[in-house]
Amino acid sequence: MSTVRKRDAAATREKILDAAEELFAERGYHGVSIREIVGRAGVDLALVHYYFGPKDALFREVIERRGAGHAADHMAALEKLNAESNGPPGVAALIRAFCEPMFEKMSRGPQWRNYMHLLAHRALARQSEVFLAPYEKTFEPMTRAFIAAFREALPDADENNLFHAVYFMHGAIVYALAETGAIERLSDGKMDGSDFDTLLDRFVPFFTAGFMALAKPT
Amino acid sequence: MSTVRKRDAAATREKILDAAEELFAERGYHGVSIREIVGRAGVDLALVHYYFGPKDALFREVIERRGAGHAADHMAALEKLNAESNGPPGVAALIRAFCEPMFEKMSRGPQWRNYMHLLAHRALARQSEVFLAPYEKTFEPMTRAFIAAFREALPDADENNLFHAVYFMHGAIVYALAETGAIERLSDGKMDGSDFDTLLDRFVPFFTAGFMALAKPT
DNA sequence: GTCTATATCGCGATAGAC
DNA sequence: GTCTATCGCGATATAGAC
């Protein structure tokens, strides 16, 4: 009996989080009401406060639910690369390891896609608010680890050039993850923004060349 | 007398638009109330509806106030380039002409900066809503014109590669324009995200190399 | 053109029955 | 753990005095 109760409780929590994730990704924190979330989740209004407390705590929980695993995937990709290669990994391999854990999640199913949309949306948000903290926790430690690896791969490059290179690359990733439909409109429907396999095949040589260009002494 | 009235009216309109621009850029459409806008503008609440009607019409007006001039600057940069060069302009010159009109506006003053922040934020928004239309009007025709120019500059490149290259570049621009503080955090405060002159010096060779890499036959 | 006053609604949050 | 009922607030929007 109590196990049934417990299973229901966990299921209810998940239903709320899934609905919130999807709606926050679509319209942002302020664009979604708790009433709308419970409507989509098919649960009662009061249960949100019962499980999560105020609205901003629910938002944080949505980010943090997948955040740890997401960040761990990034670090694992980097460590795998370090283990497999003799000496420091090359630039192309680093670029691939940096973005593949994100692009891969786009085809894992609608929930992970919603989560990545939400992360992309948050990456562009200007204000700090309560919402920067959970975001920083997932993204920035691994970004720093990758920057260190890029520095090893390109030891003669000016450090400031590398910061900018990573900055450019990160912007392109965030834009692609957001799936705004821009590339479909740009190409008159010839391209498909959700085809991240094809995107990755062009992403790696494109940004490798960019890094190399900034690594040379001018 | 009536001229005074008219000047006051224009000034009131501008005060509302300036305050709305700043606040929408900070927290997005849903994150800002009309009351907050009139508070910052120092005008009465009812005047917003008198001048602009409902809230979404005010938002559109904020976008469109600077939209035409902004798009025209882009097209002028492209035409100037075409006029100055013998034959089709090169890739590096096109990249510079594409992003310079945006980066340049970041140092024109706080209002243009707010506007560019707002555009960057909108560029990542996933939903179409009422808000895509005014955005498309300013950005996409000029993006198409530049794509045509890139195709002329790199006639042997696969068209799909060029679409992706422009997509990557646009993402990096949007991210930089948003000024999220990412590069400051990334670099432990060594870099300054508002220094678009330095950024441009690295941006052009970086993306030129990327375009060239995708232009070669693989 | 501007401001006061107010209508109407939907929001987040909670108390308490079951 | 779930649901009903409701509180209090702040939102957009408007009518009408000045």
Image (tube, coloured by chain):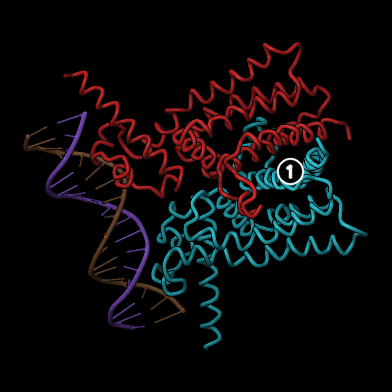
Chain colours: A red, B cyan, C brown, D purple
Q: Residue at x 67, y 46 (%)?
A: B167
Give the left or right position of residue B174, taking residue B86 as reference: left
Name above or below for residue A85 compared with residue B40. above
Dot 1 crowding, Cα within 10 Å, few <14, some 14–19, many 20+: many
Residue matched to label 1: B161
Mark 1: which secondary structure?
A: helix
Q: Is residue A57 visible?
A: no
Name above or below for residue B99 compared with residue A54. below
Q: Quadrant of residue B76?
A: bottom right
Q: Residue at x 63, y 30 (%)?
A: A99
Give the left or right position of residue B182, taking residue B126 as reference: right
Q: Residue at x 44, y 34 (%)?
A: A111
Q: Is residue A145 visible?
A: yes
- The image shows residue A162 at horizontal and vertical percentages of 75, 31
Q: Which chain letter matches label 1? A: B
- The image shows residue B212 at horizontal and vertical percentages of 82, 41
- The image shows residue B71 at horizontal and vertical percentages of 68, 63
Q: Nearer the viewer, residue B9 or B102?
A: B102
Residue type at mark 1: give it.
Answer: Asn
Q: Residue furthest right?
A: B86
